[in-house]
């Protein structure tokens, strides 16, 4: 994009030129970011599509026993689920970016919210031979949240914990209350995150090498969406992790006073 040669101007004309140049720079940066976004999305789409195409082509090459067809269809379904989750996450991101997501807040008891949510996810953890335990205070802890969106955050965190923890592992979901703040923690004793990757995990499309090896089907979108939702609640999300020991994500939310 062409810039106005501000150096040749002076006074008010210079100020106007500087202002316009700054706007042009901002537009060019936004355009560059958009192109990067499209490149990332194309890449994320290509991988599962290549896998789908390859495995279906191979299975159709000759007559096979029915278990082989079942296996190929099962694998195809996995890739299709991954593609639908990706489409859902992308829609959420684009709506969020253009400010079209409206949150509807209500006064919610986090004790009940977490107990219900972990009960729903226990079978998914059990399928992977991972235990899912929840620790909540006896008394209600009330916060002003959009329960559907906050559920999406916890789903993303707990699904990650399941994905990145080996069979026999444990996930702990804990709710505590500090003055003015509710803390929701999701801890696992899984593969952990490399120190250099920790500051990057909330970036859109970022995936750690360890995570790629453990689970090739991820999209690197879950945590960026989680952060977006938590920040829209005026809260914060943090991570602490050690390779080979495990990971804890903490969501801090302002309480209803
Ligand atoms: P995805 O899981 O699809 O890769 P996310 O945005 O949910 O995308 O997570 C980004 C990255 O953060 C992961 O690729 C992984 O490197 C790291 N990560 C997230 N949760 C965990 C966890 N519980 N244990 C280890 N690594 C994790």
Image: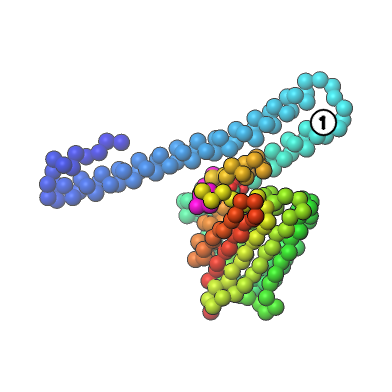
**Which colouring convention does the figure follow?**
rainbow
Name, please, the residue furthest toward the top. 62
Q: Is residue 28 above or below residue 104?
A: above
The residue at 55%/68% (across/down) is 253
Q: Which residue is mark 1?
A: 69
In the image, taking residue 136 as reference, residue 62 lies left or right, namely right
Q: Position of residue 41 (x, y in %)?
A: 54, 39
Point 56% across, 75% down: residue: 178
In the image, the residue with mark 1 has its CB under 8 Å from the nearest atom of ligand 1? no
Residue 39 percent location from the top left of the image: 50, 36
Q: How many marks?
A: 1
Q: Is residue 33 above or below residue 149?
A: above
Residue 4 covered by magenta stretch:
no
Q: Secondary structure at mark 1?
A: helix
- Residue drawn at (56%, 35%) of the image: 43
Which residue: 26% across, 44% down? 21
> In the drawing, does residue 128 fall left or right of residue 227?
right
Q: Nearer the viewer, residue 77 or 204?
A: 204
- The N terminus sits in image quarter: top left
Foreground pick, 152 / 213: 213
Classify 10 Å Cα crowding around label 1: few (below 14), some (14-19), many (20 and above).
Answer: some
Extreme residue toward the left, this view: 10
Where is residue 204 shown, x and y percent of the image? 52, 47
Q: Is residue 160 visible?
A: no
Q: Residue 11: x and y, percent?
A: 12, 50
Residue span colored magenta: 197-205
* Residue 5: quadrant of the picture: top left
Tell me: 135 left or right of 229.
right
Q: Is 23 positioned to the left or the right of 181 in the image?
A: left
**Residue 3 seen in this snapshot:** yes
């Amino acid at each position: 994009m062409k810039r106005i040669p501000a150096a040749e101007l002076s006074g008010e004309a210079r100020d106007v030129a500087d202002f316009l140049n700054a706007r042009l720079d901002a537009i060019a940066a936004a355009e560059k970011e958009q192109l990067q976004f499209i490149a990332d999305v194309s890449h994320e789409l290509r991988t599962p599509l290549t896998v789908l195409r390859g495995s279906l082509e191979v299975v159709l090459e000759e007559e096979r026993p029915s278990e082989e067809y079942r296996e190929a269809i099962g694998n195809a379904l996995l890739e299709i689920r991954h593609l639908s989750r990706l489409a859902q996450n992308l829609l959420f991101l684009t709506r969020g970016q253009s400010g079209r997501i409206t949150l509807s807040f209500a006064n919610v008891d986090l004790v009940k919210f977490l107990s219900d949510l972990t009960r729903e996810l226990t079978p998914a953890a059990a399928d992977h031979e991972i235990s899912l335990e929840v620790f909540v205070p006896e008394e209600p802890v009330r916060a002003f949240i959009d329960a559907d969106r906050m559920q999406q955050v916890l789903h993303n965190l707990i699904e990650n914990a399941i994905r990145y923890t080996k069979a026999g592992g444990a996930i702990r979901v804990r709710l505590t209350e500090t003055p003015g703040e509710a803390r929701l923690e999701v801890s696992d004793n899984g593969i952990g995150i490399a120190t250099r990757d920790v500051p990057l995990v909330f970036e859109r499309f970022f995936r750690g090498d360890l995570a790629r090896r453990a689970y090739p089907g991820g999209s690197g979108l879950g945590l960026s969406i989680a952060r977006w939702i938590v920040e829209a609640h005026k809260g914060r999300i943090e991570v602490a992790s050690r390779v080979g020991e495990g990971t804890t994500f903490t969501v801090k939310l302002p309480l209803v006073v």
